[in-house]
Image: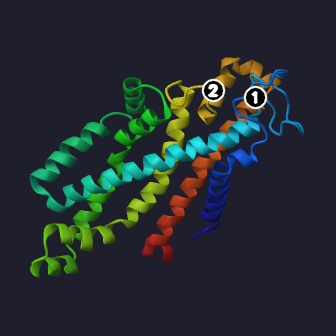
Amino acid sequence: MNRLTYIGLAIALVLIVAAVFAPFIATHDPLEIPQTMVRFAAPSAQHWLGTDSLGRDVFSRIIYGARISLQVGISVTLVSALIGMFIGAIAGFYGGWVDKILSGYLFNVFLAFPGLLLAIAMVAFLGVGLGKLILALCIIGWVGYARVMRGQVLKVREYDFVQAARALGASNMRILFTHILPNAVQPLIVQASLGMAGAVLSEASLSFLGLGIPPPEPSWGTMIFEAQQTGFDTVMRIAPHVLFVPGVAIALTVLAFNFIGDGLREYLDPKQRKR
């Protein structure tokens, strides 16, 4: 794996540690509005990354925001990958009318709409909240995994060892789960790491639009939304940190998982590794 992969792993490790140990790392209560409110205070020894428009500690909110982002990313990736793996494997293994219905119609219905637009519609229908946001992103997120798995199963099912198992009388389920899936799942691992970045970015985008994690929860997207409510010009003049800090956190998280995905693709693909 290349150097960027290790950088991505290091950033991801920092995020995981921050999310798990947030109560011990945070210096203030992320929801507390102090009685002696100091709005848009600059970074100092008391407030390492300054305060926001309500005097809340930005560093503490960033730390707790990592917990929300990783919770959404991991949940959406796991559920979407499992659903997509099952549907894609069924479509690729059985082919024929099953594949036509699943990949020819069902996949295209979800792919016909832009992902963020479909997510906005889903969240608007289900309502705001962490659980509903995860459900909405899972509903639209499984298609990419299903397409990858379908393509892999179509290839692996023609291998000699699969044909030999079929000739020996192995059942379809045994062939699928014992012989095909273990040899088709590698690209799905790469897709999952890239899907983590997409889920984190989608959560931040929806929260910024007011359709994700509702205030006062310390979501990174919500922090940017609350900052721009004051006025972009005003915030950039007196307290640019309330915009830059959550923006940098989102960018680093997305970059980290993209770097990890590229490294896994290089490691799992013998041709890429040789190159």
Rendering quarter of residue 230: top right
Amino acid identity at mark 2: Pro
- Residue pictured at 19% horizontal, 71% vertical: 174
- Residue pictured at 76% horizontal, 25% vertical: 236
The residue lying toward the viewer, choosing from 54 and 224, is 54
Q: Is residue 56 left or right of residue 249?
A: right
Q: Which disc, if any, is residue 117? A: none
| As drawn, 48 above or below 257 | above
Q: Is residue 114 left or right of residue 229?
A: left
**In the rendering, at what x and y percent does residue 22 appear?**
68, 46
Amino acid identity at mark 1: Arg
| As drawn, 42 above or below 262 | above
The residue lying toward the viewer, choosing from 170 and 20, is 20
**In the rendering, at what x and y percent does residue 16 appear?**
62, 54
- Which residue bears the numbered disc 2? 216
Q: Are marks 1 and 2 in contact (CB under 8 Å)?
A: yes
Q: Is residue 165 left or right of residue 135?
A: left
- Which residue bears the numbered disc 1? 56
Q: Is residue 275 visible?
A: no
Mark 1 residue element: loop
Distance between mark 1 and mark 2 Cα atoms: 10 Å
